[in-house]
Image (spheres, helix red, strand yellow):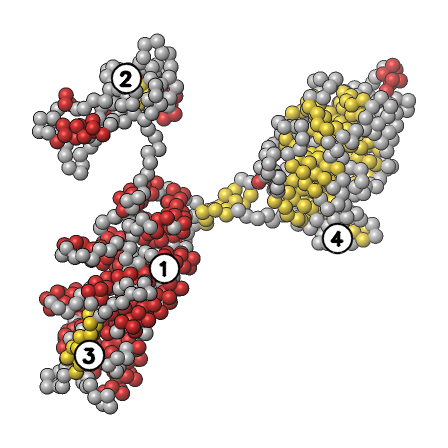
Amino acid sequence: MSGVKVDVQWSPIDDDIFVTYGTAINLYHTKDRDGILEISDGKISSDNSKIVQLATNSELQFMKCVAWCPRLEPKNVFAVAQANGRISIIGFGNQRNEDLVGKEFNVRFNRQCNHLAWNPLETNLLAQGLERSRSEPCVLIWDVMSSQGTDTADRTRHSFSEGPITKPYAELGSGETVASFAWFPSDPKTCVAGMASRHLRVYDLRDVNKPRMEAHHKCVSGICIERFDNFRLASYTESQVAIWDLRSFDRPINIITENKNVMKLSWCPTKLGVLSVLSKDSSSVRLHDIRHSLFGSDEIEQASIERNIQPFGKTHLSSYAWHPRHENRLIGVLPNGGLRDMTMFERIPMQWSANLKLMMTLNKDQIKYIEKTEESDDISNLMTKRISLNYGLQAHDMTENLKAIENEPHLQGLWRWICNIRTLIASQAVSNSRLRFSPATGIITLLNLDNEDGNLNSEPVAVHWRASEGAKYSKRTHYRSNERTMSLQLCGWIPDLPSENFEEFINSLVQAGDPERASAIALFYLHIKRALEILSNCAMSAEQEGKPNLQAVAMALSGFTEDKNALWRRTCGTLRYQLENPYLRAIFAFLACDEDNFEDVLNEEDMSVEDRIAFALNYLPDAKLKLYLSKLTAELTKSGDLDGILLTGMSNEGIDLLENYVNHTSDVQTAAIVTVFSMSNAIMKDTRVIEWIEAYRDLLDRWRFWNKRAQFDIVRQSLIQDHRVAPHVHVSCNFCGKPVSANVSLLGRARSLITSPFSRGPQNRPKVTCCPNCRKALPRCAICLTHMGTASGSGSETGSGAKLTPFQEWFTWCQTCRHGGHAGHITQWFQEHNECPVTGCTCKCVSQDAVARRLSQAEDIRGDEVAIL
């Protein structure tokens, strides 16, 4: 091409052959990919290069254009155009077809050739683009395989020069200059040319009198057509690149502006929508991925994804060429002839498949799955495990949800709060208490600490106790109020009065395999003898193998004394830090602390949040309790610890805590489920809650858990009263256009008939035979001629397993002719017929159904197999 000192082309036939041309034509062979050929002072400076020069031809002078013939035989044949417009056919090596090599094609008047292009399909056609000369045609299409002999008249009319003369196959564009030319890859008779610095014209060789399409634009200096989409082409002039679509050829669909004048423009032959541009004095080839552009929009400016490739670093390139078959392979050439064959490493798009396998595209025809070799703790795997265990899909049975997370202790406290708040609400309803609160209530709200003027008015109660028989009684102060008692129940604790309930509670903890916690709670209620019994009994049990010596701990506790200066206090206060179990440490901290200083117990972070809060509810006065709970709430909210929901409930602070939890763990599943189970209409208006729920529903759909997503929607609708899903589809009347549904009085009458002992037969089913709005008759079944509209729920079955109207009595209709009837009747009809059952209608309704067509094809195939057998 003009303006390029050294250009390069890959062989259209061989994968490892290419040519460079400038003042001479050099044929190279590449042994392997990623080869580099260094040239210094016109000589090859490396003998170990992967690129080997095979031949050279410097006989032709003033070469302007070179085109590689795409014919299989002979190979390595080139058309070379010189400055005077003459075309010579040359070849390298021994050529079998001597009739082609050595041919020359002359023009009538000497003028510069701007472009040469072989037809990729009809390889005997060679196009030549020329400068303007009077009224002479500027595009000549040569048939290189035509006979060389022509009569004297033709020879005289087409040339004044000596030598062989061939009449062109076709002539285009009289009296103009051709700056660019390209054949369409899929149509051998169609081409496009850039003419007169302002016209892009599409020609059909079957009618060369006028162009088939034409666009007026200045971008005509170079043109190329995309291989994968022949409707799309690109052209340039100076620093502008125009993208065209032949279906809208009046103006470009995209304009790309480069920093400098464009030297070469080319579509990637192995990638859809990738356009490469080389600018003047540039060291990089810029790639534009225009697949992401919004074509055809008048309001949005078109955009493309850009990327730069630098084959030689910061050294300026002379030209480049894409390999026509190898993906992402490109060769660059320097002005001195230096070469580099390189493979472009592109961005690898990655995506999660529906079965949670990582999928990536390696090239245009390979997709790789990364198999999961071992179970990981990735949140997506955890969420799918929970889904398989019906996590969050049981609206009233909380034990199922707890089973799904039995190996995730950070979620168990949250679900225990949900269970305890529901149990508390039920107990308040049974006792006819005046206190009413929602399932979203937390301890802060229950204690009225969320109001600045909130006051607990707790009553201090002195509790006298002694460590052993004969010891002096000691005094501890408990604080009591109705609010504190209910808060203890939220924490899972039971007051020690009545003693039967408390003993049952302690025994349940021991049976659950947590004797340390049971003994600690018994001691916190000042039942030290019961605590010693639990430790002693569990120490002798075979089930406690591997646990610390509980018998020694029990013996140490038995020596407890209230004397602050006693050796026991000093010794146990020091040795408790050596115990691994937090509840054992809390036991010694409680016995060793002063009467009103419980910091060591409250700051035992390895204890559950529920137990620490319950301890504070028993022993802290109102002022200290408010301060402690406020501090603990702030810490848990900041860290996103879900145990803090026990304090905040599903309030605004609770949503903030959930937001921090989702930000830390990406567990949008738990956030969506918990907000639904809170049964709070207020928080459902929060944008964060809406996003979590919709994101979780979208995840279920992506992972193909469609049934689970439907179950989640059912749970959501049953728990949130304000959430009602509007019907997506309904039958409308053909006359008034309003939905066809029975009115309330008719439905009420229908229910009364159904519940009557005399209405068990089908003759008593209520009928809706007309539109309830306009009273026009509803359609009839084409088979039995009864009106559509039999009310559902009229069967004789009762209970949860009772069905409504059977599917056979549902109404269905053809989407083409609009005729239909009961599903059972229609199904039976089309088992023996193909056409519509309505008289005079010739619609083949069954052929409109894709499922029916596939079933019919399958039956035909089975019939053919049987016939063959």
**Front-most of residues 134 and 761:** 761
Report which residue position mark 2 lands on: 777
Where, by quadrant of the figure, is residue 619 drawn? bottom left
| Residue 491 makes an appearance in the image | yes
Q: Secondary structure at mark 3?
A: strand
Report which residue position mark 4 lands on: 315
Q: The C terminus appears in which quarter of the rendering?
A: top left
- Check disc 3: other Cα within 10 Å, few if <14, some if 14-19, many if 20+: some
Amino acid type, mark 2: Ala
Q: Earlier in the sequence, mark 2 or mark 3?
A: 3
Residue 477, image x, y percentages: 20, 77
Compared with 136, 225 (above or below) is below
Where, by quadrant of the figure, is residue 490 drawn? bottom left
- Check disc 4: other Cα within 10 Å, few if <14, some if 14-19, many if 20+: some
Report which residue position mark 3 lands on: 476
- Check disc 2: other Cα within 10 Å, few if <14, some if 14-19, many if 20+: some
Q: Are marks 2 and 3 in contact (CB under 8 Å)?
A: no
Instruction: State the residue lying farthest toward the front.
Output: 453
Q: Is residue 41 left or right of residue 352?
A: right
Q: Earlier in the sequence, mark 2 or mark 4?
A: 4
Residue at screen point 76% across, 50% down: 316
Circle on res. 653: 1
| Residue 867 makes an appearance in the image | no
- The span from disc 2 to disc 3 (Cα, nearest Å) is 83 Å
**Front-most of residues 94 and 87:** 87
Q: Are marks 2 and 4 in contact (CB under 8 Å)?
A: no
Residue at screen point 31% across, 48% down: 681
Residue 530, image x, y percentages: 14, 74
